[in-house]
Amino acid sequence: MIDLYFWPTPNGKKVTILLEEASIPYRIKPLNIVKGEQFDESYLALNPNHRMPTMVDSDPSGGGAAISVFESGAILMYLAEKSGQFWPQSTDKKYAVVQWLIWQMANMGPKIGEYNHFNRLGSEQGDQSYAIRRFDDEANRLYGVLNYALHKHEFVAGAEYSIADMSVIPWAMNWKAHGQDLDVFPHVKRWLELVLSRPGVQRGLDVGKELTVDPNTFTPEEKERFRRLLFNQRAIPVPGGEFDA
Ligand SMILES: N[C@@H](CCC(=O)N[C@@H](CS)C(=O)NCC(=O)O)C(=O)O
């Protein structure tokens, strides 16, 4: 059985899209990152990066002890390989998918994450205009890269729908919140219409809807707690260790 430590954000939804598309049985283990459950000792043992998602497979192919994997891109590769779906294995197609998956993990996810961070920060943290411009440019550049790829082929990594598409969908579907205009990126628009119409994608995006919290409804105390928990994170000590890095 696959257990997925999950909270309904784009990085979690990449994995639920694949689980639904590939009809893999799974259980959701809600990991409330707003309350700070990513720092629980038991979770750190699975994911020392204290981020969501993490997957535990208690029934790995070939038997043996349970396997635990963190980083959404690595989880997509694990599940696609195990199910034999959405990751073609000829060397050329395999690495076409890998390069786009790593592009999403190393570029689109982190840079747009920073775009969101600086745009939501608020003026009480001082002048953010350079950071906002920097990540707005970067978001625009990345949508351009995606548009360029999709003008050459139907799907992100080529002619076949794959885990590379699944890694991009929950991010690119929020183009408006990223300050972008899809009329400027018609190939992204065409592709989004196509992939968002897939029933498996819709089911994957729906997972955990009931867990969603709207930070706009937080009391001032909750807002402050949220800020302290998620912003300005620094190194955590190993168990029993103590330092103020
Ligand atoms: N590269 C990681 C990023 C994971 C990530 O940043 N997850 C966010 C939610 S989308 C998180 O757990 N945030 C909690 C925190 O910042 O403390 C992956 O793709 O798995």
Image (cartoon, grey):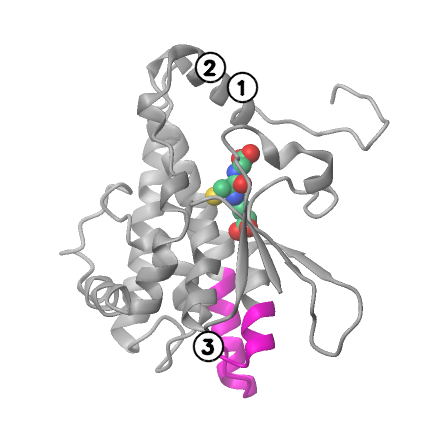
Circle 3/circle 2 CB separation < 8 Å: no
> Residue 6's x, y, as percent?
52, 47
In the displayed structure, 53 sits above or below 200; it is: above
Is there CB contact under 8 Å for labels 3 and 1? no
Q: Is residue 126 above or below residue 211?
A: above
What kind of residue is marked 1? Arg
In percent of width and height, residue 4 lies at 56, 54
Residues in magenta? Answer: 78-102
Could you tell me which residue is drawn at 17 percent across and 63 percent down?
186
Is residue 80 covered in magenta? yes
Circle 3 residue: 86
Q: Amino acid at mark 2?
A: Glu
Q: Which sits in the foreground, 46 or 130?
A: 46
Q: Are marks 1 and 2 in contact (CB under 8 Å)?
A: yes
Q: Which mark is residue 36?
A: none
Q: Earlier in the sequence, mark 3 or mark 2?
A: 3
Relative image position of residue 223 (x, y in whole percent): 42, 17
Q: Secondary structure at mark 1?
A: helix
Q: Which mark is residue 224?
A: 2
Residue indicated by mark 1 = 228
Residue at image position (31%, 54%) is: 172
Circle 3 Cα neighbour tier, 10 Å, few/some/many (<14 / 14–19 / ≥20): many
Mark 1 closeness class: few <14, some 14–19, many ≥20 residues within 10 Å: few
Residue 179 colored magenta? no
Horizontal arrangement in the rendering, residue 95 relative to residue 240 (left or right): left
Comparing 28 with 236, the one in front is 28
- Give the amino acid at mark 3: Phe
Tag 2: Cα neighbours inside 10 Å, few (<14), some, or many (≥20)?
few
User: Which image quadrant: the N terminus?
Assistant: bottom right
